[in-house]
Image: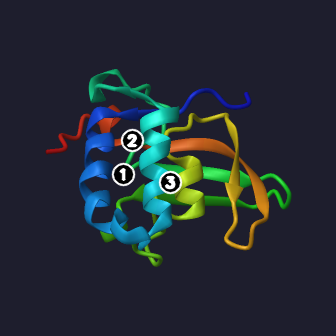
Amino acid sequence: MRTTQPTVTELDAARIREFAGPLHGFGRMPAVGDLLEWVATETDVVPSDRIAPDVVTMGSTVSFMEVGTRAVFRVSVVHPVDVSIEERRISVLSPVGRALFGRRVGEFTTVEMPDGGEREIEIRTMHYQPEAAGVPRP
């Protein structure tokens, strides 16, 4: 499977707008503005109870493979305040977090590297998604 239109939950979209507001001002964090625009223009925003269980949402834990090296990594995609490198929780604002967010298991997508290069990854396994697990998120 290649890529389809990314899908995000209404809750995730609202929380991104909420945390992005103070960070986006004055061009302090271009990644925030890019994420805001991407959610507004390129994603299908759906109610949480309608998100497919194989879509990467905030709090999801997934495995992906870097196509060039065939190395497999397992990470959780989280809000910037919840990042923990030791626990493999990466920010949705990081290149890999942004590439995974809203994508489905089986899709290939491109990670835009800080040096301007690109790497192709394949989303391999959904280990945990809060919505599929029925975890209430305020």
Dot 1: element: loop
For the residue pair 63 and 111, the one nearer the viewer reads as 111
| Residue to which mark 1 is pinned | 59
Q: Are marks 2 and 1 in contact (CB under 8 Å)?
A: yes
Residue drawn at x 50%, y 54% is: 34
What whole-number distance in Å separates the C-alpha atoms at marks 2 and 1? Answer: 7 Å
Check the image and name the residue furthest to the front: 26
Q: Which residue is mark 3?
A: 34
Query: Which numbered disc covers residue 39?
Result: none
Mark 1 neighbour class, 10 Å CA radius: few under 14, some 14 to 19, many 20 or more:
many
Residue type beneath disc 1: Gly
Q: Quadrant of the C terminus?
A: top left
Which residue is tagged 2?
Answer: 129
Which one is earlier in the sequence, the residue at label 2 or at label 1?
A: 1
CA neighbours of label 3 inside 10 A, class few (<14), some (14 to 19), many (20+):
some
Q: Is residue 135 above or below residue 30?
A: above
Q: Is residue 96 above or below residue 38?
A: below
Q: Residue at x 68, y 31 (%)?
A: 3
Q: Is residue 110 left or right of residue 31?
A: right
> Mark 2: which amino acid?
Gln
- Coloration of the structure image: rainbow
In what element is the residue under mark 3?
A: helix
Q: Nearer the viewer, residue 55 or 46?
A: 46
Disc 3 marks which amino acid?
Asp
